[in-house]
Amino acid sequence: MSLRRSYTIIAPLYDALLATAGTGLRAASLAQLPREGNQEILISGIGTGLDIPYLPPGHTYTGLDLTPAMLARAKGRIGPLHLNLVQGDSMSLPFASECFDHVVLHLILAIVPDASACLQETARVLKPGGSVLILDKFLKPGESAWFRRTLNLLSQHIVTRFDVVFEEVLASVPQLRMVADVPLLAGGWFRGIRLVKS
Ligand SMILES: C[S@@+](CC[C@H](N)C(=O)[O-])C[C@H]1O[C@@H](n2cnc3c(N)ncnc32)[C@H](O)[C@@H]1O
């Protein structure tokens, strides 16, 4: 099953499963976006738009997702924000280079089949000095995590990967530098990470 097909099935259930979980984490991550100025901000893998209530007004947002059923739900959350929704692939972004000031990657980097391609594309569309906000689950370098790695054999095709080591992904994108890395949930399995493009 493709991720697009499985997220089409998951879409009507997604908010019931995740709307309350991680609310504070989303808010804290998105509080790092500037409050002033009209900046261009990409939310890659926007899903049903659970981030939307925490986005500061005044910026121009683009929300991208692979799955039309998820985008249809995000559309209902836009309200007064200046947010355009685009169907597309986070690993091959349909945008010019260096056109965004910030990129949000909440629960997408460890979802896509190729996290390095996703982060490389993020770096390409980001302006120099721009930032990337990441919220996701990652294995630590050298962590055996046999249960998660075994589960990953099936889950990577349906909903998410469980075997992504963030440090390995970051090493493939030398333009991005880590400036913050905060352990959040489940003993640091979930992390809040901020990167800056040099
Ligand atoms: C776990 S949800 C996260 C949604 C949202 N970011 C959030 O924090 O709730 C993963 C999302 O990634 C989308 N997705 C999966 N593969 C994708 C890809 N290659 N490009 C863009 N979006 C993708 C799915 O359609 C789904 O909406």
Image (cartoon, grey):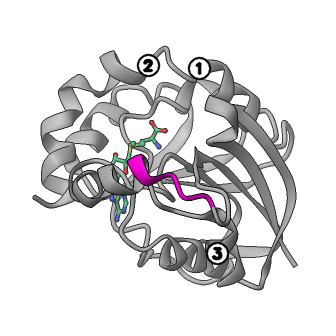
Name the residue located 84 percent from the left edge and 43 percent from the top edge: 34
Whether disc 3's CB lies below 8 Å from ligand 1 is answered no
The residues tagged by marks 3 and 2 sit, at their Cα atoms, a distance apart of 30 Å
Q: Is residue 143 left or right of residue 79?
A: right
Q: Secondary structure at mark 2?
A: loop
Measuring from the top left, give residue 22's x and y in whole percent: 57, 23
Type of amino acid under label 1: Thr
Quarter of the figure that contains the C terminus: bottom right
Type of amino acid under label 3: Glu
Name the residue located 59 percent from the left edge and 64 percent from the top edge: 165
Q: Which residue is mark 1?
A: 23
Q: Is residue 81 left or right of residue 10?
A: right
Q: Is residue 18 left or right of residue 190?
A: left
The residues tagged by marks 3 and 1 sit, at their Cα atoms, a distance apart of 28 Å
Q: Secondary structure at mark 3?
A: helix
Q: Are marks 1 and 2 in contact (CB under 8 Å)?
A: yes
The answer to whether one can see residue 55 in this image is no
Relative to 89, say whether 85 is above or below: above
Q: Residues within 10 Å of mark 3 (few under 14, many from 20)?
A: few
The answer to whether one can see residue 139 in this image is yes
Q: Quadrant of residue 91?
A: bottom left
Measuring from the top left, give residue 103's x and y in whole percent: 65, 58
Q: Mark on residue 168?
A: 3
Q: Which residue is mark 2?
A: 19
Discs 3/1, front: 3
Discs 3/2, front: 3
Relative to 42, say whether 23 is above or below: above
- Whether residue 149 appears in magenta in the rendering, the answer is no
Nearest the eye: 90 or 135: 135
Q: Earlier in the sequence, mark 3 or mark 1?
A: 1
Type of amino acid under label 2: Ala
